[in-house]
Structure formats: C-alpha cells, structure tokens
Amino acid sequence: MSVSARVRWLLAAWFGLVVIYLVFPLLMLVPISFSPTQFLRFPPEGFSLRWYRTFFTERSWVEATWLSVQIGTATTILSLVLGTGAALAIVRGEFPGRRLLYGLMIAPLIVPSVILALGLFLILARAKLLENMAALIAAHTAIALPYVVLIVGAALRNVDQTVERAARVMGAGPLSAFRHVTMPAIAPALFAGGLFAFFASFDELVITYFISGAIETLPLRIWNDLNLRLDPTVAAVACLLILVSVIGMGGAEMLRRRGAPAQE
Amino acid sequence: MALRPNRRWAPVLLLAPALLLLGVLFLYPLAEIMRLSLFGRAGFSTAAFERFWTSPILGIVFVRTFRLAVEVTAICLLVGYPVAMFLATLRRNWRTVFIVLVLLPFWTSVLVRSYTWMVLLGREGLINTALQWAGLTDAPVRLLFTPFAVYLGMVQILLPIMILTLYGVMAEIDGGLSRAARILGASPWRAFWHVYVPLTVPGIATGCVLVFILALGFFITPALLGGPRLRMLANLIDVEVHETLNWTQAAAIAVVLLAVTLAAVGLFRLLVRERTLYGTAP
C-alpha cells in the first residue's frame, strides 16, 4: 500500500520499538551468561566461562542434553517416515474424506499441549507406560507429525506430476519413481520438515513433564532448575539453545520457502 | 503418480502408520479425558463441571484465563498491525532482512523466552537496576509474579505469529486499490479505514484465532512469570494432577478448555471460509 513519507517514518519507528521488545530480552542473556557471579545481575561484573563449563561438565546437564538429542533424532526419523507417507496419500490419492484426514493430521497443532499431556498421562498411567522412552518418543512424534505433513504436503502440490508419470511410463516401479523423481524434488521440504520435527521434540516441555517421570530431557532439566533457584548455568544453556534454534530453524525456514515458493 | 497400479490400496498403506499413531496417542487420550470428566470413581457425575460455578477458585481462574487470552490477542493485534504494514511497504530485498528480526525470537523456545523475562524482571534484574540507578525507586520493585509480567511475556512470545499472519495477507493486497481511493478524493485516513483495513480482515481473523487459542492453553509462561497466585486453567490441570490428585477434576478443566478452543476454531471457519488456520487444504 502506498503511504506518505511521514506515515512511513512513524511505521518504521514503531517497527524499531517492537523489534527491541522482541529481540532485546534474548540479547541481554549473552552478557549475563558470561557473568562470574552467582547472582544474575546486570550489567555483569567481569567475565568468566564458569557457567558454560558447568553445563559441559556437570553430569545431569550433559545427560539431559544427550537424551534430548536422541529423542529428537528418533522423533525426526519417525515423523518424516509417517508424515511423508500420509502427505503423499492425502495430496496424490483420490478418495473421499481427504480434507477430514488432513484436518486430523494438523489437529495436534490446535489442541493445547497441556490437554494432550493430561490425556497421554491418563492412558499411559493405566498402561503402566509412564517413564517409558518409546512412549515418550511416540508422543513427541504425534506433535511433530503436523509440521512434516504441512511442509511436505505443500511441496508435493508443487511437484510437476507429468515427470512422475513419465518415469512410470518408462517402466520405473512406484518406489523407484518416488526415490528418483519425487524425492529429489521435495528434498528441501523433507529437510525443513525434519528440522521442524526435531525442534518440536527438542523444545517440548509440557507433555514430557506430564509423562516422562524420572527421564529428564533438557527442557525438563531447565524447568526443574527454574523452579528451585535461578542458577546462571541456565543462562549459558539458554544462550546455546538460542544459537542452535536460530541456526536450525533459520535453515528450516529457508528450505521451506525454497521447497514451496507459492506458500508464504 | 506412483500409486497408479494399486490405486486403491496404496493410500491406505501410506496413511495407516500415521493414522494408527494419531488414533492411539491423540484421539484416544482426548476421548479418555472426556470419559473421565464424567465417569469418575463414583460412576456418572457432573460434579467436576458444577465446580466451575460452586468452587470460588475455578470460576475465577476460568474468567482470568479467558480475559488474558482475549486481552493478549487484542494487544498483539494493535501492536502488530502497524509492524506488518511496515513490512508490507518495504521493497522486496529489504523485507527478508526485517522479517528475520521478527522471526528470530519466534524460533526460540517458549521456555527460554519466558526465562529471559524472569531474568529481566527479577529483583536484581536489569529493569530494577535501571530504575534504582535512575533514582526512581530506592528498593527493588516487585515486577515478577505480577499480571504485568505475564502479559509482557505472553505478548512478546505470541506477537511474531500475529505479525507474520497479518503480513502474509498484506503482502498480497493490490496497492492500486488504496491509490484509486485517494485519487477519487478519499482522505488518507478514509482510504486506510474503508479500503485497506477491510482487505486485511482475513489476516486479522486468522491471526486473532491463532493467538487466542495458543494463549488460552499457555502453561509455561504463567507458571514462570505469574507464579502460584496467577494460575491459568492449564496450570490448574497441573495442580489437580500432581498436587491434589483429583484426575476427574483435571479432566473436566481440560474438557472446558478444549471446548473454548474448538468454539474459537469453529467461529473462525464460519466467518472466514476461504482460508484455513494453517495454510492451504488439499
């Protein structure tokens, strides 16, 4: 829309203020994480790496991080396989109820996670599967699946189907046609969906808190720490997490846009 | 596509694993919540729902949660609308740079972002240090565990979603329409209010519903920034499960929360037919 220069300056100034509000709390964490003192004070007095050292050496932090990476990786693989299959069937199949099925696949994004957490807690408690790694990974997959279905589904809609048909006419089997024609075409979307799925699991707290028992993932380790005391180790962990999510999610967003240029 | 020879069965085989997973770990848990909310240990009873009227706490928390979600949505809309407009007026190559500034916090987890506000608003935090340094107060002001902290944190966390949704709609608006209104003699304000804003209504509706349903179910931020005195319905579910051990009550609260969420989504689908909440339908 066309706006006068004065209005444009006002909008730019407002944008600047809002960006400060959005980004400043994250940036402020960086100097605090290098603080040498036990208390979170700003500005910090001096410089030290002691909280980073604690994170990389204290057993509970290292174990929680490794556990979250493992669960996240398993969730990524599972939701990519299940989600891509579902997206293929919904986008390419011709059968009634596709819209409804698509809605079901996306629904875990709409239902508040605390509700799903309670429901999972109830059924897993009855099945004596609380504090069970496989159940935790499966639950994470349920909430990571929508991202894969959304992103891969959008990419599939943009793939030219005549090339796939050509491959089939030339004698390629269905699996071979998918492997050599469809998959290369949706590769960016698969990477993007995988990254989104990984972070859906890696950052997940509420469901894990309800069903994981003594299995302590990284977000749960942070959560338990926050409810006891404010230790600057968390500041160091948070800084590292911000860095990792900005790189990972930034990459995923770039790939998603490349995979589905028509989608905003 | 590749499904040609066995057209009938291929989709079923491809869908089955995902459907099985969602059936067992999404639909069944929700059904179990509904069952338990009505059929507790003592058989059928609506007592857990009646407590929304009879218990003093539950009613207050319900109103508090609903109000918080509505107000956070309204603030996000008012704050975010001009931001999205600014992004839409930018030239294409600049847009990406500025959008990344909005996306940056969006990529970070809710837990980490809530934590940053705990650090900022604490007794020894930056805001209190600045206030004392400026001589505005002698002793630290209580900022953490106040409604102010909850609103500040929640708006910061949800604002990027509102901005990006509005921007998505604004970027596709034909600028010629507002210009035509101006040429035909409309004042800038009239052109904005009667031409531009109506064109952005789908974005407003989508953004508001998304932010509202997310705010309604917020658990981490109210717990960390509001504390036990400012519990929301989501936090009450946690208390009923882990402290009072009244699972039937927890289930009833979840059913009410789910009902309000679904009502918001239903209202959205009635009002905005041509869009879905998350991109295109098949």
Image: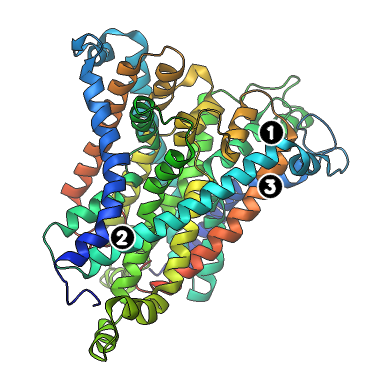
> Judging from the image, what secondary structure is the residue with disc 3 in?
helix
Look at 39% across and 75% down and name the residue there: A183
User: Same chain, marks 2 and 3?
Assistant: no
Q: Relative to A121, does residue B112 appear above or below in the rendering?
A: below
Residue B174 in view here? no
In the displayed structure, does residue A179 sit left or right of residue B269?
A: right
Disc nearest the viewer among 3 and 1: 3
Question: Under tag 1, what secondary structure?
Answer: helix
How far apart marks 2 and 3 lie (CA) works out to 32 Å
Nearer to us in this view, B52 or B41: B41
Q: Pointer 2: what residue?
A: B279
Q: Residues within 10 Å of mark 1 (few under 14, many from 20)?
A: some
Q: Is residue B94 above or below residue A139?
A: below
Q: Quadrant of the C terminus of chain B?
A: bottom left
The disc at residue A239 is: 3
Pointer 1: what residue? B127
Residue contact at pointers 3 and 1, CB within 8 angstroms:
no
In-image side of B160 versus A183 (left or right): right
At 38% across and 25% down in the image, what residue appears?
A125
Taking the image as shown, residue B133 lies to the left or right of residue A121, namely: right
The quarter holding residue B241 reads top left
